[in-house]
Image (tube, helix red, strand yellow):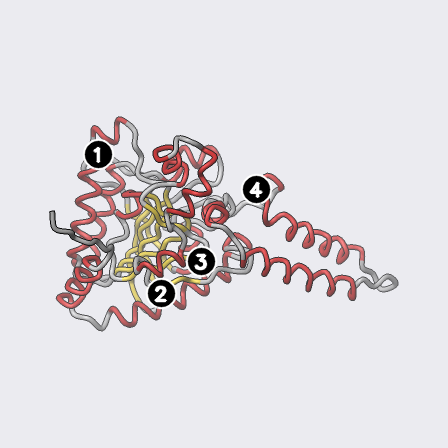
Amino acid sequence: MATETAPPPVLTDRMILEFERPIIDLERKISELRGLSTESVDFSSEIRRLEQKARKLQKEVFAELSAQQKVQLARHPARPYLLDYVGLLMDGFIELHGDRSFRDDPAIVGGLAQFDEWEVLVLGHQKGRNTKDNMHRNFGMARPEGYRKATRLMRLASRFRRPILCFIDTPGAYPGLGAEERGQAEAIAKALQVMASLDCPTISVVIGEGGSGGALALGVTDRILMLEYSIYSVISPEGCASILWRDPAKISEAATQLKLTAPDLLELGVCDEIIPEAPGGAHRNAALTAAKLRAALKRHLHELVELSPAELIERRYQKFRKLGAFVEQPA
């Protein structure tokens, strides 16, 4: 039985980001004119003019987004989450629960599903749509039992050579005292170790924010894809500004310096492909974004399923060995 999740919220004034407000104001005027149009009063020419203006404005605004504005889009409260994409991309999703050691962690959702021609394991972080749901999901911040559940399910999928699709969307692993007492670092390290040695095809998609080791725990895969306005970083801009400058006014600079946007990470070789989002971001048209994601996942899966287990493991090893660069100087 598929897991239930609250529907994406209606875009309210409180949810609108400052840089997208002029675009949405224009769209609201267009909607009002459509409502006023009758057989005797025709506003079609004015509507067409405003539609052209809105498209042009949207193109101009989104062509010049700063790193911090992309961070805001990655965290947008109306952005599609894991279970939204499961509903749009998968058939017959059956959620699997528990780490067989402590308990189930709702911040990480995993289960079996049919994706196109493949039977796959779906794994990912899940945030909440409202206060109650966010308390249940812990704002997408997984505890050790979440990562141990993920490790258990990945081993299960590998046993039957089912492809694994991971959806990353978390501020980071939960840093609470209980999580540390139950071995948060060990659970993440084990997930990294297991992912590196899986003999089935694996793909990660950063659909929102990919923060720190909590994101990396689902990111040691054959291919790493990023949605256009997602982010992936060792630390949040807020945390970076606090540590380096002790000044919240430096958050925007920190976002720029961290190189956390999809184009930055594609250039650095961390990301393998950027998936275009719907105009204005995934929250404006989740179905269109999901259709583009489906095409990319199918293309990569077709390539990966042709490889033997030994080839998959060796290529994965070489992929991560190449990440990063350093220069050694004699003492």
Along the line of sight, the residue nearer the viewer: 150 or 26: 26
Q: Is residue 149 above or below residue 90?
A: above
Image spot of residue 267 (x, y percent): 35, 61
| Residue placed under numbered mark 1 in the picture | 102
To which quarter of the image does residue 143 belong? top left
Q: Measuring 46% from the left and 62% from the top, which residue is drawn there?
A: 276
Q: CA distance from mark 4 to mark 2?
A: 30 Å
Q: CA distance from mark 3 to mark 1?
A: 37 Å
Of label 4 and label 3, which has the lower sequence position? 4
To which quarter of the image does residue 43 belong? bottom right
Q: Amino acid at mark 2?
A: Leu
Image spot of residue 254 (x, y percent): 41, 42
| Residue placed under numbered mark 4 in the picture | 15
Looking at the image, is mark 4 or mark 1 nearer the viewer?
Answer: 4
Along the line of sight, the residue nearer the viewer: 113 or 8: 8
Of label 3 and label 1, which has the lower sequence position? 1
For disc 3, the neighbor class at 10 Å (few under 14, some 14 to 19, many from 20) is many
Q: Is residue 110 above or below residue 42?
A: above
Of label 4 and label 1, which has the lower sequence position? 4
For disc 1, the neighbor class at 10 Å (few under 14, some 14 to 19, many from 20) is few
At mark 2, the secondary structure is helix
Instruction: Kindly identify which numbered label has been placed on residue 228.
Output: 3
Circles 2, 1 touching at the beta carbon (< 8 Å):
no
Looking at the image, is mark 3 or mark 1 nearer the viewer?
Answer: 3
Q: Amino acid at mark 4?
A: Met
| Residue placed under numbered mark 2 in the picture | 297
Q: Amino acid at mark 1?
A: Phe
